[in-house]
Structures are given as structure tokens and as C-alpha cells.
Image: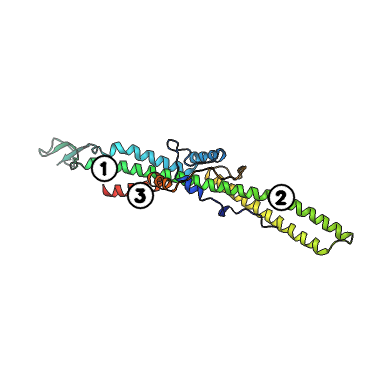
């Protein structure tokens, strides 16, 4: 009677791997397909997550370095004094006393500045790919936790219905036993099943609290902020083609771009 719990790990969560291969071009706030409530959570996470904000600042910093990477070093202005008497510090005492002012500028070998500029550009491109990969990973974590929360909420609803049913059966068994028409074994069995359901409820409520805390942590929210679970757990209506998905993954997967730019940086 108690084998009713829906197992979130055994359903089609692999469908999120498909979503990761379907980024929304031109919309950095919605990197994967999602229902409106889940989309809102993902966008909130991308905006407020501390790691994402840190990576965004790093990307902007690298982009700002690109114009300066290919420029010459700053001019060096120098001032020197030679053969100055240390007893009087007079510039007219010794004929060999000299005052010097000089300007220095380094000129690198031909093409070196272009290579430095290319390297800086590749570093920025690589960091931007890392940022996009982290956004997708964050979206995946939020989505998985969100749907697991939905499974737990559904399991709690089933638990409540079963608890009400077993409670009714227990009352019937106790009434029949009290009137001599039932067996004590039926009463004990109903009590055991009811106890199992109550233990299962405690475990599910604890799991729900853990999932809510995890989502709040990913979204950088205050602790104990309630998270509304999904109303339904239907599969998205997707028309999948393995070849198209493979091509999209090879072309748009940010992890592959990170590796490719790393190779390009080494070659520069």
C-alpha cells in the first residue's frame, strides 16, 4: 500500500540534456526551454546568482582589456642627477655635476602587438563561453530541483489520500472488532500501515524543505522562502531528431567553445 512514491530520478530528466542543446539565441536570460513558472525561476537565478554575477564581471573586464592589449606600453619619463656633492648639494660646486631628463619607449617586434590583441580577444571569448556554460548548468540545476519538488508535492498529495483511506479502514476495523464481528489482526495491520504513511509523510516534508532550500540557494534568496511546485508534471511536446541534436550540440555547446578557444590561445 505504501509503494506510491514517484521516483524523480527514474523519469525522463534526461530530457534536460536535450534542452541544453537548444539555447535561445539572443536571450541570455532564458538559456533553456521551460514552462513560464520555471522560466521565471531560471531568469531570477541568472540575474541574482553570485557565481554568475562574478563571471559576468570577469567577462566585462576582459573585454575592456582588448583595446589596451595591442597598444604600446606607456612612455617612461626619467630624471637623474650625477656627481652632485653630498656635503653641500650645490649644483655649481662641481663642473661634472649633471642634470638629466630622458623619455623612453619600448617598441616590440613586428606583429607582437597583434598577437597580444588576438590573445586578449580569445581570452574574452573563452570566458564568455564559460559564462554561458555556467548559465546552462545553473538552469539545469534549478530545473531538476524544481521538478523533483513537483514529484515530492505530488507524493505528499497521494500520501494524504492514502492516509485518509487507511484511517477510515482503521475506524471500520476497530468498530467491527468492538462488536465482535472483526479480527484484532485487521486493526493491528491498519495501525501499522497508518504508521508507515505518517513516517513517509515526515520524510517527504523533510525532502521538500531540502529542495526548497536548494532552489533558494541557487537563486540567492533568503532562507525559508516558499517555492511553489509545478502544477503538473507533463512531458513537453518535443519533436526530437538525433542528427539535428548532435549538430546543434557540436555547433552551440559552450563547453566545446571553451575547449576550442583554449586550443586557439595555446596556438597564438
Front label number (3 vs 1):
3
Task: Say what secondary structure mark 2 lies in.
Answer: helix
Q: Position of residue 44 (x, y in %)?
A: 52, 39
**What is the CA distance from the residue labelled 3 to the residue labelled 2?**
50 Å
Q: Dot 2, how many residues are within 10 Å of its Cα: few (below 14), some (14-19), or many (20+)?
A: some
Nearest the viewer among 144 and 216 is 144
Image quadrant occupied by the N terminus: bottom right
Q: Position of residue 178 (x, y in %)?
A: 88, 59
Front label number (1 vs 2):
2
Q: Quadrant of residue 4?
A: bottom right
Nearest the viewer among 238 and 13 is 238
Identify the residue shown where x is 47% and y is 47%. 18
Q: Which residue is mark 2?
A: 160
Nearest the viewer among 158 and 60 is 158
Q: Are marks 3 and 1 in contact (CB under 8 Å)?
A: no
Nearest the viewer among 245 and 189 is 245
Task: Say what secondary structure mark 1 lies in.
Answer: helix
Residue projecting furthest to the left: 95
In the figure, is residue 225 to the left or right of 167?
left
Q: Dot 1, how many residues are within 10 Å of its Cα: few (below 14), some (14-19), or many (20+)?
A: some
Q: Earlier in the sequence, mark 1 or mark 2?
A: 1
**What is the CA distance from the residue labelled 3 to the residue labelled 1?**
20 Å
Question: Is residue 28 depicted above or below 215 in this figure?
Answer: above
**What is the CA distance from the residue labelled 1 to the residue labelled 2?**
66 Å
Q: Earlier in the sequence, mark 3 or mark 1?
A: 1
Mark drawn on residue 259: 3
Question: Is residue 183 depicted above or below 242 in this figure?
Answer: below
Q: Position of residue 95 (x, y in %)?
A: 10, 38
In the figure, is residue 24 to the left or right of 179?
left
Q: Is residue 174 visible?
A: yes
Q: Which residue is mark 1?
A: 116
Amino acid at each position: 500500500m505504501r509503494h506510491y512514491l514517484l521516483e524523480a530520478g527514474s523519469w525522463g530528466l534526461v530530457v534536460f540534456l536535450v534542452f541544453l542543446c537548444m539555447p535561445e539565441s539572443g536571450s541570455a536570460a532564458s538559456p533553456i526551454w521551460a514552462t513560464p513558472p520555471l522560466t521565471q525561476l531560471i531568469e531570477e537565478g541568472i540575474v541574482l546568482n553570485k557565481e554568475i554575477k562574478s563571471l559576468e564581471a570577469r567577462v566585462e573586464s576582459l573585454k575592456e582589456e582588448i583595446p589596451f592589449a595591442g597598444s604600446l606600453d606607456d612612455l617612461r619619463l626619467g630624471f637623474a642627477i650625477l656627481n652632485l656633492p653630498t656635503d653641500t648639494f650645490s649644483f655649481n660646486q662641481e663642473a661634472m655635476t649633471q642634470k638629466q631628463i630622458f623619455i623612453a619607449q619600448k617598441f616590440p617586434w613586428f606583429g607582437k602587438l597583434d598577437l597580444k590583441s588576438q590573445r586578449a580577444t580569445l581570452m574574452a571569448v573563452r570566458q564568455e563561453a564559460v559564462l554561458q556554460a555556467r548559465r546552462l548548468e545553473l538552469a539545469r540545476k534549478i530545473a531538476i530541483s524544481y521538478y523533483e519538488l513537483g514529484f515530492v508535492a505530488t507524493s505528499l498529495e497521494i500520501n494524504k489520500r492514502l492516509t485518509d483511506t487507511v484511517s477510515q479502514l482503521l475506524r471500520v476495523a476497530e468498530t467491527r472488532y468492538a462488536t465482535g464481528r472483526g479480527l484484532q489482526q485487521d486493526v493491528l495491520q491498519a495501525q501499522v500501515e497508518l504508521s508507515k504513511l505518517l513516517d513517509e509523510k515526515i520524510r517527504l516534508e523533510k525532502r521538500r524543505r531540502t529542495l526548497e532550500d536548494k532552489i533558494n540557494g541557487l537563486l540567492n534568496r533568503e532562507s525559508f522562502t516558499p517555492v511553489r511546485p509545478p502544477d503538473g508534471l507533463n512531458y513537453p511536446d518535443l519533436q526530437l531528431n538525433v542528427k539535428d541534436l548532435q549538430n546543434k550540440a557540436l555547433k552551440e555547446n559552450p563547453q566545446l567553445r571553451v575547449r576550442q578557444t583554449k586550443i586557439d590561445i595555446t596556438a597564438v
